[in-house]
Image: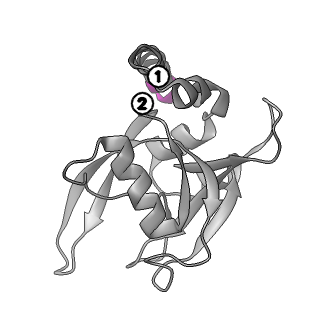
Amino acid sequence: MPYRATSDALDAPLSVLLVTSMETKRWVLPKGNLVKGLSAHASAAQEAEEEAGVLGAACSASIGSYRYRKRRDNGASRMVDVDVFPIAVTDELDEWKEQDRRERRWFSLADAANAVDEPELKGIIRNFRASDVAPAIAAGSPASVREARRGFRMFSWFQALLRR
C-alpha cells in the first residue's frame, strides 16, 4: 500500500496510491505474487514499482490481509489472499513498466477506502496510520517488526469484532 504524507508532521493527512486493474479498470492496490528470493515486503515494493511507478521504504510487517476474487483470462476465477505492506513513497517515477496498462491516482484515506471493492481492504485503508508503522520502517530490526506484528494482530482482531 503506497502512501505519503502531505507534510512532515506526525499527524499530517495521508494519501494512498491506487492503480486500475488491467482487466476491469477498478481501483486496486498494486499487488502480485511473491518474487522468488525476495521477502514478502520486498516483493510488495517491487510490485509497487512495476504497477504504480513508485519507490519507497516498505514495512516488513503486514498491516492486514484481505481476500478477493481474481478473474483469469479464460473466464474462470479463484479466491486469492493478499497481505498488505505499507510503503512510504519517496520517489514517483515518470516512466515505469506498466504505465501504458494502468492509471495511477493518489487518494485520501477515506476516498481510497471508498474506491476499492473489498470490505476488508476498505477497513485496512480507513484505519491506517503511518505513525503505527514508522518505527518498524525506520528501525528495521527484528524486535521492532515483532512488536509491530503483535500490535497489528491485536488491531485486526478488534477490527474483526467491529464488523459484526
10 Å crowding of disc 2: few (<14), some (14-19), many (20+): many
Rendering coords of residue 92 (x, y %): 63, 64
Q: Amino acid at mark 1?
A: Phe
Q: Amino acid at mark 2?
A: Ala
Check if mark 1's residue and mark 2's residue have beta carbons within 8 Å. yes
* Circle on res. 61: 2
- Residue found at x 50% / y 75%: 96
Asked if residue 2 lies in the magenta stretch, the reply is: no
Rendering coords of residue 22 (x, y %): 40, 77
**Numbered label tally:** 2
- Residue found at x 19% / y 52%: 36
In the picture shown, does residue 49 fall above or below 134? below
Q: Earlier in the sequence, mark 1 or mark 2?
A: 2
Query: Which dot, 1 or 2, sits closer to the camera?
Result: 2
Question: Which residue is more in the foreground, 161 or 99?
Answer: 99
Rendering coords of residue 136 (x, y %): 52, 25
In the picture shown, does residue 164 fall above or below 18? above
Q: Which residues are magenta?
A: 160-164
Asked if residue 161 lies in the magenta stretch, the reply is: yes
Q: Residue tagged by mark 1?
A: 152
> Chief secondary structure of the magenta span?
helix
Question: Which residue is more in the foreground, 100 or 125?
Answer: 100
Q: Provide the secondary structure element on which disc 2 rests.
A: loop
